[in-house]
Amino acid sequence: MRLDPTAPTFVAGHRGMVGSAIVRRLIADGFTDLLTRTHEELDLTDRAATFKFFAQTRPRLVILAAAKVGGIVANNSSPVEFLSQNLQIQVNTLDAALQYRVPRLLFLGSSCIYPKHAPQPIAESCLLTGPLEATNEAYAIAKIAGIVHVQAVRRQYGLSWISAMPTNLYGPGDNFSDTTSHVLPALIRRYEEARSTGQASVTNWGSGTPRREFLHVDDMASACVHLLKTYDGPHQVNVGTGMDQSIREVADLIAETVGYAGRTEWDMTKPDGTPRKLLDVSVLRASGWEPSISLEQGIRSTIAWFRSNRSTVRA
């Protein structure tokens, strides 16, 4: 599908890691009328404010990257907030986009929408075929609701809205907190602090055996713009690399890259989460897209970004 780079384009969540990467990609592709609002300027959980924004700006393309996100600890300890806030953001934005008949929209979800014990690699058809991982079930259900919402709009109103489900993302702008971040940025911070303070050992959660797929956020942004240009189907599309590593392997790679020479220990009393989560990305690959940033390259550049922005990163 042809995208008009001069059309008003709303990127919801533009200051987050995902949204900022999409903005960078759109600018590189020549988009000239990007609509962005900070949370202070536009609270998407405020339904009236969201509809007023759409009435005033009339976007023709919407990318919904705004969300309340976090790692295992945050999801497990605050399920009400992860369910309620994400549902509010989604319903308000999607309803407003429908009210003003936005012709093209991309809803961004997460690979946690799939069952905990889904066959690996996980195909798009696995959605709603089994129980979810308990630690992030509330967040996953909110994202599933968004997918169904997009499908319902397509079916009832004929608008060309689509959904993309990225795997575990990382890169510049990530959250590096020990308690609310996802695993890769948390490991980067942990090993970098251990190196700089001379700690003899680092203790990581769980056994280190679960396997995860990681995608650099700039590759994710590239894939999303590619899908907006090429895909117009009812089903969500998986976005990933098609390769995974154990958490232990990722920890070793990060330790080596930051230059940490101490011991790594594993706290088996802490949860592992889903044993394996690898996406089947054959639909995306068949459309002509491939990732361009290897895990080694991505980790190296993300560590460099973290060091350069240490005083201002989300932590």
Image (cartoon, grey):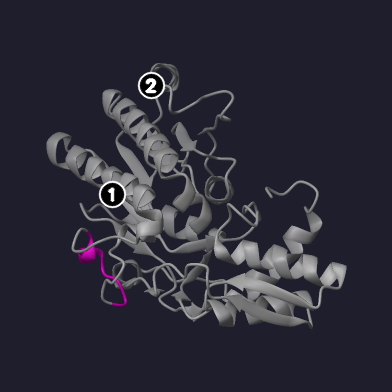
**Dot 1: element:** helix
Asked if the residue under mark 1 is in contact with the one under mark 2, i.e. CB atoms within 8 Å, the reply is no
252 above or below 219? Answer: below
Residue 71 seen in this snapshot = no
Among the two numbered marks 2 and 1 on one chain, the one whose residue lies closer to the N terminus: 2
What is the three-letter code of the residue carrying label 2?
Answer: Arg
What is the three-letter code of the residue carrying label 1?
Answer: Ile
Q: Residue at x 33, y 44 (%)?
A: 142
Residue 127 seen in this snapshot = yes
Q: Check disc 1 and report the residue beneath it.
A: 144
How far apart are the alpha carbons under marks 2 and 1? 20 Å
Does the magenta run of residues contain 169? no
Quadrant of res 62: top left
Is residue 244 or residue 131 the one in the foreground? 131
Q: Check disc 2 and report the residue beneath it.
A: 47
Q: Residue furthest front?
A: 269
Q: Position of residue 151 (x, y in %)?
A: 20, 45
Does the magenta run of residues contain 121? yes
Magenta segment boundaries in residue numbering: 120-127
Quadrant of res 249: bottom right
238 above or below 74? Answer: below
Answer left or right for 263 relative to 295. Answer: right
